[in-house]
Image (cartoon, rainbow, N blue to C red):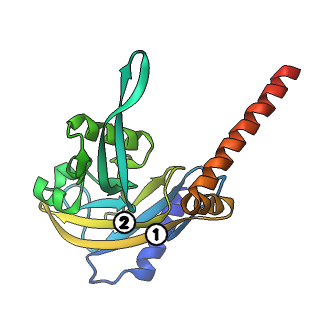
């Protein structure tokens, strides 16, 4: 596996890099297909630099963001032994997917002002909300998205080879939403960003998964009826099986 990675890095550097370019970055693929059997994937982010990277040299940061979408966090309240929806906070536009990784954590490489500018770190990720204002709702959003693997911070370090080659695996969970994704690779030196490369890839649903997604968006009532019918059918078949056993 390591040999394959090195060959890919060397091929990308030889074929695409220019001698004067301070930073060159590429993706192993620019399209991810999601079918009904999709259980996650990963994309290799790789490239080269004109100057040495690692201890005593420059450093690399990689931040990936997915399409913006609204997200609502609700608090359950118990009344007379029953649970009901209580206060809620609506986050109007947060990334459906977010990942940041580096040769070192971003907070060790850049001051907070620059981290905020480049959205490097969950603690500086903009999350404007309406409704309930308690900080627990932001904490709940962070917990839910991290548990689902949709928001990641320093989950896998950027690895260095031969002083000027780097690569990192970007894990995509099974619940990754469709849309366009942006990968920004930053070259950091002396606590400032000295070069940047932007790459993009698309996640799209194919086959039956695409049909289901289209129906859920275009005909939500029909989609709900089908889901209820399938659940009832599954329950009926299960009762028959268990009755026979």
The answer to whether one can see residue 25 in this image is: no
Residue at the image point whose x is 46% and y is 69% from the top: 201
Left or right: residue 213 compared with residue 5: right
Q: Of helix, strand and loop, which one carries label 1?
A: strand
Q: Residues within 10 Å of mark 2 (few under 14, many from 20)?
A: many
Identify the image quadrant of residue 164: bottom left
- Please give the name of the residue rendered at 17% of the width and 49% of the height, measured from the top-left corner: 108
Q: Residue at x 50, y 71 (%)?
A: 30
Mark 1 / mark 2, whichever is N-terminal: 2
Q: Which residue is mark 2?
A: 183
Residue 62: image tag: none
Q: Position of residue 180 (x, y in %)?
A: 44, 68
- Within 10 Å of disc 1 (Cα), the crowding (few <14, some 14-19, many 20+) is some
Image disc number at residue 201: 1
The answer to whether residue 37 is above or below residue 25 is: above
Q: Are marks 1 and 2 in contact (CB under 8 Å)?
A: yes
Percent x, y of residue 214: 59, 63
194 vs 66: above or below: below
User: On the rendered image, what quadrant is the C terminus found in?
Assistant: top right
């Amino acid at each position: 596996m390591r040999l394959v990675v090195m060959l890919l890095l060397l091929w990308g550097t030889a074929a695409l890099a220019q001698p004067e370019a301070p930073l060159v970055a590429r993706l192993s693929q620019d399209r991810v297909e999601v079918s009904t059997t999709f259980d996650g994937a990963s994309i290799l982010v790789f490239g080269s630099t004109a100057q040495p990277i690692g201890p005593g040299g420059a450093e690399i940061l990689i931040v990936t963001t997915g399409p913006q979408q609204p997200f609502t966090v609700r608090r359950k309240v118990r009344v007379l032994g029953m649970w009901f929806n209580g206060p809620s906070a609506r986050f109007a536009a947060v990334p459906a997917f977010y990942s940041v990784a580096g040769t070192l954590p971003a907070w060790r490489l850049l001051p907070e002002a620059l981290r905020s500018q480049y959205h490097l770190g969950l603690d500086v990720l903009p999350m404007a909300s309406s409704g309930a204002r308690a900080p627990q709702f932001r904490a709940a959003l962070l917990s839910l998205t991290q548990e689902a693997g949709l928001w990641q911070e320093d989950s896998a370090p950027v690895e260095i080879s031969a002083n000027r080659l780097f690569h990192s695996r970007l894990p995509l969970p099974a619940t990754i939403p469709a849309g366009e994704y942006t990968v920004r690779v930053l070259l950091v030196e002396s606590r400032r960003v000295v070069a940047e490369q932007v790459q993009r890839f698309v996640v799209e649903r194919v086959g039956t998964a695409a049909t289901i997604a289209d129906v859920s968006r275009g005909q939500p009532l029909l989609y709900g009826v089908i889901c209820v019918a399938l659940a009832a059918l599954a329950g009926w078949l299960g009762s028959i099986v268990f009755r026979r056993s």
